[in-house]
Image (cartoon, rainbow, N blue to C red):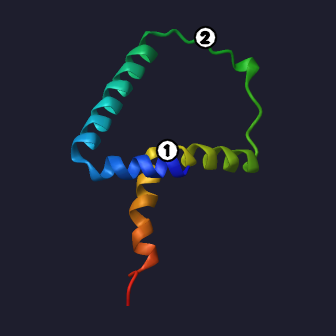
Amino acid sequence: MMAVVGVSTIIASSTSLFSIEKNLGAVYLVHLGTKLSREKFNVDLRQAQLPVTVPAAFQQAIFVDGFNPTTAKRIAGALPDLGGPLTQ
């Protein structure tokens, strides 16, 4: 998690790296959309999954959010504000 925060801080401080990351993300999303539109879906409603329990959904949300670079950027941006001034 700390590595994600460190990399996110470096990317957030560099305009060119942020632009590269943003453009690569856009290209990746276009790739995923193209790949998804070419696939055929066979949906069988008889094999439906059981509903997810609340603890399992919470655990999955924490896991996904923990590895989300956007979340790490927001946390890294908020950390200096939480500590207050270093000298008085």
Q: What element carries label 1?
A: loop
Relative horizontal placement of residue 62, taking residue 77 as reference (left or right): right
Q: In which quarter of the image is the C terminus?
A: bottom left
- Amino acid type at circle 2 is Asn
Residue nearer the viewer, 59 or 82: 82
Which residue is painted at 63% across and 15% down in the image? 43
Relative horizontal placement of residue 39, taking residue 51 as reference (left or right): left
Q: Relative to 72, does residue 43 appear above or below in the rendering? A: above
Do the residues bearing badges 2 and 1 touch, measured as CB atoms within 8 Å?
no
Residue at image mark 2:
42
Which residue is painted at 30% across and 37% down in the image? 22
Total marks shown come to 2
Q: Residue 68 carries which label?
A: 1
Place of residue 53 in the rendered image (x, y in percent of width and height, measured from the top left): 76, 45
- Amino acid type at circle 1 is Asn
* Pointer 2 local density, CA inside 10 Å: few below 14, some 14–19, many at least 20: few
Place of residue 35 in the rendered image (x, y in percent of width and height, measured from the top left): 43, 14
Residue nearer the viewer, 36 or 17: 17
Q: Relative to 19, does residue 77 appear above or below in the rendering? A: below
